[in-house]
Amino acid sequence: MQLTSMKVVILAGGFGTRLSEETEIKPKPMVEIGGRPILWHIMKGYARHGFNEFVIALGYKGESIKEYFLNYPDHNSDLTVQTATGHVSRRKTPPEDWIVHLQDTGLETITGGRVKRLAPFLTETFMLTYGDGVADVDLPKLLAFHRAHGKLATLTAVRPPARFGALELDGDRVTRFHEKPQAGEGWINGGFFVMEPGVLEYIDGDAIHLEREPLERLAQDGQLMVHRHAGFWQPMDTLRDVRQLNAMWSAGKAPWKTWES
């Protein structure tokens, strides 16, 4: 595995209202799959290919994510604690060697605004995804495709569950981007973006949804390309999704697990 300095942005600040059974006490990216936050699963997928520097856009209950990474070795080790002295010894060292930037991007900030607030980190090509979905996307192939076409942005298109909508495509170029088209048809935005810093010029402020004006304008300008992914992709929007992903993990049939144990 060859490490890269390319940053991976993970949007992890939303309220997760459709998963309120879990998100009343924790942010959505901290909901667990197989005993680990889904955020960890996403990061492991990127790190598998050498993308090990992350910029996490925090908002709702961001302190929970901060606490997790501040105490990451303890969360992922067997410990012996000497209560009289407070001395702690670990019998297992986590294998992950990540750089994790934890950035508060505002409680009410929308997805586009969160990306805009990360501008100081995004001076070169960067990857971006949501903190609530897993997939077995071939990330090196995605990056190579992005570099080959020379446009500002690439999104990964996936075949949707029925509740999502579609993209209009002309070859590998997105011609129209719909936020709420008719469900169950065509391809949808599955996240797993590669972007250039120039994308930030399409985002006007905190109240902007990345999935609306910025992507729509990029598509109109011929600057939004699509990488089709026909493999596994699953968002975690409902309690049913959580149970389904946990069942896959427990059965040893988690398609998004592309790394070695």
Image (spheres, rainbow, N blue to C red):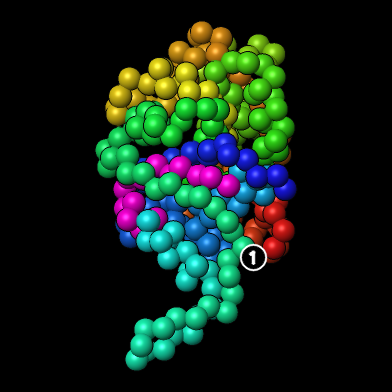
Examine the structure image and report whether residue 56 is included in the region drawn in magenta.
Answer: yes
Residue drawn at the location 55% of the way across and 28% of the way down: 125
Residue drawn at the location 67% of the way across and 16% of the way down: 149
Residue 162 in picture, x, y percent from top left: 57, 35
Examine the structure image and report whether residue 121 is included in the region drawn in magenta.
Answer: no
Amino acid under disc 1:
Ser
Q: How crowded is mark 1: few (under 14 residues within 10 Å), some or many (20 or more)?
A: few
Above or below 119: residue 149: above
Left or right side of 253 for 12:
left
The magenta segment is 52-65
Res. 162 visible in picture? no
List the residue tagged with mark 1.
250
Above or below 37: residue 198: above
Above or below 120: residue 35: below
**Quarter-of-image position of residue 167:** top right
Residue drawn at the location 44% of the way across and 59% of the way down: 69
Res. 173 visible in picture? yes
**Nearest the eye: 78 or 3:** 3
Residue 144 in picture, x, y percent from top left: 70, 27
